[in-house]
Image: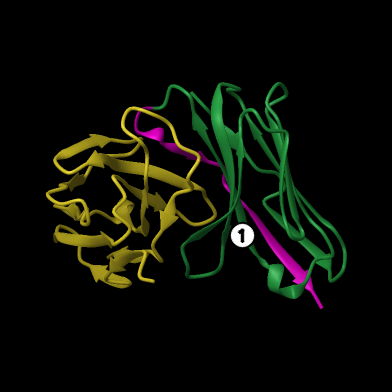
Chain colours: A green, B yellow
Amino acid sequence: KQEVTQIPAALSVPEGENLVLNCSFTDSAIYNLQWFRQDPGKGLTSLLLIQSSQREQTSGRLNASLDKSSGRSTLYIAASQPGDSATYLCAVTLIKAAGNKLTFGGGTRVLVKP
Amino acid sequence: NAGVTQTPKFRILKIGQSMTLQCAQDMNHNYMYWYRQDPGMGLKLIYYSVGAGITDKGEVPNGYNVSRSTTEDFPLRLELAAPSQTSVYFCASSYFPSGGYSNQPQHFGDGTRLSIL
């Protein structure tokens, strides 16, 4: 069974510092990995999707890397801002998963202090 | 741009009551999903549908039922509400080509916060 883990569960940094969020998964037979942002009381917004054949994806200040062989992905957020405060979740799609289902990690709650 | 719309946003139920959580999407997506999120946890899949008339169980289906009579709507029904069903429920949708995988992300609604007392 695929297990997705995000450590730490919570993170607090001063504004301007770079954020590094970790995601690990036990089954490397994935089709893709996604990073989502969740604001309090809101749904999930997709940030980046990395296909299994890719090593990284970038969007503005966000960069996500994928190392399938070691079962790890890292989300980097450069020059953090208070508006980056949110919960970040990673999720994988297993190649063998019917319905292209996502398996989620527990999330990392980020607070960026002004 | 409506996207995925969930109603109601909040609801309090008594033990044993029943209710239906509504989900509608206007993106002509064929795949739809229901997840629950418990405090401090990730999302767990309850049920999913790959098209109108086709549904299947996810990881935590007990106590829930779904139907998919149209492409747009995917309601989730709780028949006998129990305190363990207190959670935030999210509906999501995505498009996948027939029989294949896709790298399109899932689109989520804002959730329904449900308390069972």
Report which quarter residue A17 is drawn in.
bottom right
Residue at image location 21% in from the left, 45% down from the top: B63
Q: Residue furthest front?
A: B97
Q: Is residue B103 left or right of residue B111?
A: right
Q: Quadrant of the C terminus of chain B?
A: bottom left
Q: Position of residue A18 (x, y in %)?
A: 85, 58
- The one of B116 and A31 positioned closer to us in this rendering: A31
Magenta-drawn segment: A98-114
Q: Is residue B96 left or right of residue A40?
A: left
Quick check: B107 above or below A42? Answer: above
Residue at image location 43% in from the left, 22% down from the top: A96
Q: Is residue B31 magenta?
A: no
* Residues packed near mark 1 inside 10 Å, few (<14), some (14 to 19) or many (20 plus): many
Q: Quadrant of the N terminus of chain B?
A: bottom left
- The one of B60 and B22 positioned closer to us in this rendering: B22
Q: Is residue A105 magenta?
A: yes
Q: Is residue B75 left or right of residue B69?
A: right
Quick check: B7 above or below A109? Answer: below
- The one of B37 and A31 positioned closer to us in this rendering: A31
Q: Is residue A52 left or right of residue A59?
A: left
Inspect the image, locate mark 1, and give the three-letter code of the amino acid beneath it: Thr
- Label 1 residue SS: strand
Q: How many marks?
A: 1
Q: Position of residue B109 (x, y in %)?
A: 38, 62
Which chain letter matches label 1? A
Residue at image location 51% in from the left, 48% down from the top: B42
Q: Position of residue A103 (x, y in %)?
A: 49, 37
Q: Position of residue A31 (x, y in %)?
A: 53, 29
Circle 1 is placed at which residue position?
A: A87
Report which quarter residue B65 is drawn in.
top left
